[in-house]
Image (cartoon, grey):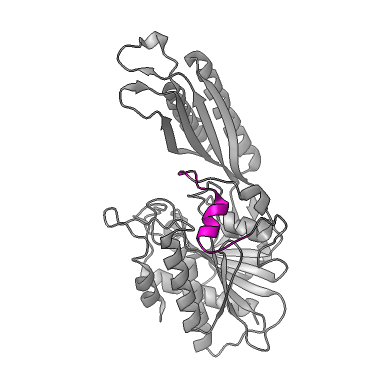
Amino acid sequence: MGFEEMWADLAPIGRSATSGGYFRQPWTSTDAELRAWFAEQAGARDLHVEPDLVGNLVAWWQPPAAEGPAVLTGSHLDSVLDGGAFDGPLGVVSAFAAVDLLRSRGFVPTRPIGVAAFVEEEGSRFGLACLGSRLATGATTWEQARDLRDRDGVRLRDAVEAAGFGVADDPTWRGLFDGRIGCYVELHVEQGRDLVDRGAAVGVASGIWPHGRYRFDFTGEANHAGTTRMEDRRDPMLSYAMTALAANKQARLADARATFGRVHVEPNGTNAVPSRVTAWLDARADTEEEVASLVDAVTRQATERAGRDGTTLEVTAESVSGLVSFDPDLAARIAADHAEGDWPIIPTAAGHDAGILSAAGVPTAMLFVRNPTGVSHSPEEHAATADCLVGVSALADTLERLAS
């Protein structure tokens, strides 16, 4: 089954009939369908699938003579809420297609090649981005993660067990990648327009901006929307509204990124002043110091506004990732000497499992496939089939170099 056939086979899973976007949440029935698709593709290629205790998957291509540290590729299959088709799945489908292309060339790896599908990369259910790869590398322990709760109050431990996996309650377990991976290469749709501006179908990542998710809890006093005078209110919605505007201004001044994309209101009534507003800030910048400065500035303004509104504020850092600089020698090797010329080497402001493996000491690289609109985390996310096939070829070339 070639790239286009695999893509068509995967496309209906988790797709909304109304928006056309995807709701591929981890440890759900949709996730089970995705894992079944992964197992089917691996089986069709005689690749042995090895799951770990939380649902990370690796399909191994390991001929008898292949030995030594493995070359890992792949990405993730989960999505943000109402997300696009390409973010994550493109890397998994391309990895299987690259194996097919290498075999058609008669290539036999001397090092094992693994195709990975990491679980909960987006953090859209349990709030911690790249949770699967964090657990697999030991960056986050099971003891730290097991009591995380989703929007419905379901604990991570219970969701994992209900999906047929089980960590028991062993805080010492390490994922199935521990000590076995020599390098990792992740192909991903570009989440921006850099490659469009450069006129290139494929690029190579230089690094990932530092970024974090911060929960802002504004607490006030519930009251009647009609009978409570404006000057008598302790309205946390006002505190939040000013904070969202402040985040926008501070990010623009610093040439950074600040987004409040998720808000929860209590009691969430049309005719009631809310008692509590919880909002999540996504902050990103070129350096860790700039991220910290951005969050500090927003927090300071939010606190001052809360004081004027008679509300209170508590800020909690839920997920923070530092600057990732990918192996420059590996990036240069991948980018050079292609028939189309050298691929451009570009940074990204989006987080990826590749960043987690890099931070764990695994030599890591990323390939990006051009996104004509630059839109991502949206049903409008797209990559042309012709560019995807160039990406498959680039990934196959890379795996051939690394696994020879």
Q: Is residue 170 left or right of residue 197?
A: right
Q: From the image, which quarter does the N terminus lie in?
A: bottom left
Q: Quadrant of residue 293?
A: top right
| Residue that sits furthest to the left in the current view | 18
Q: Is residue 306 left or right of residue 140?
A: left
**Is residue 128 visible to the viewer in this orientation of the structure?**
yes
**Is residue 370 visible to the viewer in this orientation of the structure?**
no
Q: Which residues are magenta?
A: 151-167
Taking depth in this image into account, of 59 and 292 the one nearest to the observer is 59
In magenta stretch: residue 245: no
- At which x and y percent is residue 221? 45, 18
Q: Which residue is at 37% across, 30% downward?
A: 268
The total of numbered circles placed on residues is: 0
> In this picture, is 295 found above or below 342?
above
Q: Is residue 47 left or right of residue 69?
A: left
In magenta stretch: residue 158: yes
- At which x and y percent is residue 163? 50, 61
> In this picture, is 76 found above or below 107?
above
Q: Is residue 380 left or right of residue 152?
A: left
Q: Quadrant of residue 185?
A: bottom right
- At which x and y percent is residue 305? 50, 19
Q: From the image, which quarter does the C terminus lie in?
A: bottom right
- At which x and y percent is residue 116? 56, 69
